[in-house]
């Protein structure tokens, strides 16, 4: 009798193990009630389906299918919810790897949980530089973290300055504004701190005057007070660094006020197709850094955008680079022949000019993407009469042109 009981216990334990061995389990952790999390999931779904249709991932000669774990981090509202989600996917759902993450404060906390369990965590949303600094300061603990997108906040700043310089040049030439006035409007969160400091320090060196800095909540439902003050300051450019729903409010209220100032910066909500409808058609001339468009940043970008749009009837935001994260994992696993994170880390570190859908990736010693225009810098887009028009970098095939409010 004891023998039968022991046999039953062994079989019960072996069954889930056998199931786990048959798939590569990848947790997709993000704010699933928001566009950022939705894009995390949709990008991952495409990667899973593309891999599985091709037979799966070859692990030491054995083909294994990809299985996704859907995990709502609720990280825009609660850091503790985010860490709980990370804990669950690792301990309860037995994820082999984790991709996603968006709000830097939450991702920093989730990073700690993943590192406790030595789980590879490929970030697809958070920009705070501390995530990579942790790798450099304590490599043995944090080596399992890799940032896929976006580039760290300082490198986002480099891209923003490059595009802003181009816009300012057009403004000086077309509107005869030799020293454009810039208002900084950045949500009050961790990832914007470095960008705001860099703007305040460097814009005067670029012959631009900073007329003030305004920092609403990422979930603010009204920015009338901020825009009124910006109008009074006579700003020519509203430099935005917003990733939450406030980006929609900003676009709509700038349109309602018929502001002549040019809005450019980061506005994650403006990256999605629904931005035009969400602003009731008032988001004209709002521009933002973006990642995806019908332009040839890499040979894989246009095919990916077409596949994404055909499947989901919308364009991808940068968070959809979970597709690249999963493809990076696939390539590393097949090269190493194992799911062992410790053996995969040096393989990922060895990727050089690894071509994805969102850019061409090489990781530095902090496991941050090495920045470069046309490789990991992303693109800039502007809303023009209901269409999202890419306009930077100019050397990329398929770019349009930037327009000023009131232009025909």
Image (tube, rainbow, N blue to C red):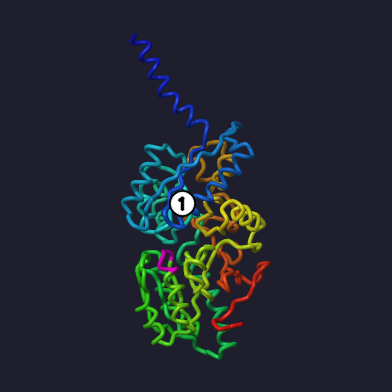
Q: Residue 234: x percent and y percent?
A: 43, 87
Please, is residue 383 above or below residue 94 in the view?
Answer: below
Q: Quadrant of the C terminus?
A: bottom right
Regarding residue 283, the answer to whether it shows in the image is yes
The reply, left or right, for residue 355 in relation to residue 21 is right
Region rendered in magenta: 243-248
Question: Left or right: 92 with respect to 280?
Answer: left
Residue 201, by quadrant, is: bottom left
Does the magenta run of residues contain 226?
A: no
Left or right, 105 with respect to 70, comes to left
Residue 73 percent coordinates (x, y): 38, 50
Between 304 and 38, the one nearer to me in the picture: 38
Q: Secondary structure at mark 1?
A: strand
Kindly identify the residue that appears in the image at 68 percent across and 67 percent down: 397
Q: Which residue is mark 1?
A: 100
Asked if residue 313 is positioned above or below residue 336 in the image, the reply reads: below
């Amino acid at each position: 009798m004891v023998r039968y009981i022991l046999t039953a216990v062994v079989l019960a334990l072996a069954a889930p193990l056998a199931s786990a061995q048959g798939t590569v389990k990848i947790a997709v952790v993000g704010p699933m009630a928001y566009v950022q999390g939705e894009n995390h999931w949709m990008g991952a779904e495409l990667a899973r389906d593309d891999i599985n249709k091709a037979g799966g991932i070859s692990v030491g000669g054995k083909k294994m299918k990809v299985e996704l774990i859907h995990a709502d981090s609720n990280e825009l509202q609660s850091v503790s919810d985010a860490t709980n989600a990370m804990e669950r996917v690792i301990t309860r759902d037995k994820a082999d790897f984790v991709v996603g993450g968006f709000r830097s404060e939450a991702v920093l906390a989730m990073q700690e949980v993943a590192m406790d369990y030595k789980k590879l965590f490929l970030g697809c949303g958070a920009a705070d530089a501390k995530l990579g600094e942790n790798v450099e300061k304590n490599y043995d603990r944090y080596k399992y973290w890799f940032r896929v997108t976006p580039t760290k906040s300082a490198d986002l700043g480099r891209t923003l300055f490059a595009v802003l310089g181009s816009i300012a040049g057009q403004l000086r030439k077309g509107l005869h504004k030799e020293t454009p006035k810039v208002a900084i409007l950045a949500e009050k969160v961790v990832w914007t701190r470095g960008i705001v400091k860099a703007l305040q320090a460097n814009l005067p060196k670029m012959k631009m005057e900073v007329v003030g800095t305004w920092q609403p909540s990422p979930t603010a439902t009204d920015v009338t007070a901020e825009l009124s003050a910006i109008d009074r300051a006579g700003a020519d450019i509203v430099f935005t660094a917003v990733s939450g729903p406030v980006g929609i409010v900003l676009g709509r209220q700038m349109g309602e006020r018929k502001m002549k100032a040019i809005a450019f910066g980061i506005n994650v909500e403006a990256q999605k197709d629904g931005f035009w409808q969400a602003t009731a058609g008032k988001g004209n001339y709002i521009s933002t850094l973006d990642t995806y468009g019908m332009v040839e940043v890499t040979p894989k970008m246009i095919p990916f955008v077409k596949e994404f749009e055909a499947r989901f009837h919308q364009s991808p935001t940068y968070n959809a680079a979970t597709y690249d994260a999963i493809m990076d994992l696939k390539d590393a696993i097949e090269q190493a022949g194992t799911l062992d994170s410790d053996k995969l880390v040096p393989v990922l570190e060895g990727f050089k000019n690894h071509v994805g859908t969102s850019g061409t990736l090489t990781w530095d010693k902090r496991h941050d993407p090495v920045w470069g225009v046309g490789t990991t810098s992303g693109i800039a887009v502007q809303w023009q009469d209901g269409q999202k028009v890419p306009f930077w970098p100019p050397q990329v095939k398929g770019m349009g042109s930037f327009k000023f409010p009131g232009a025909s």
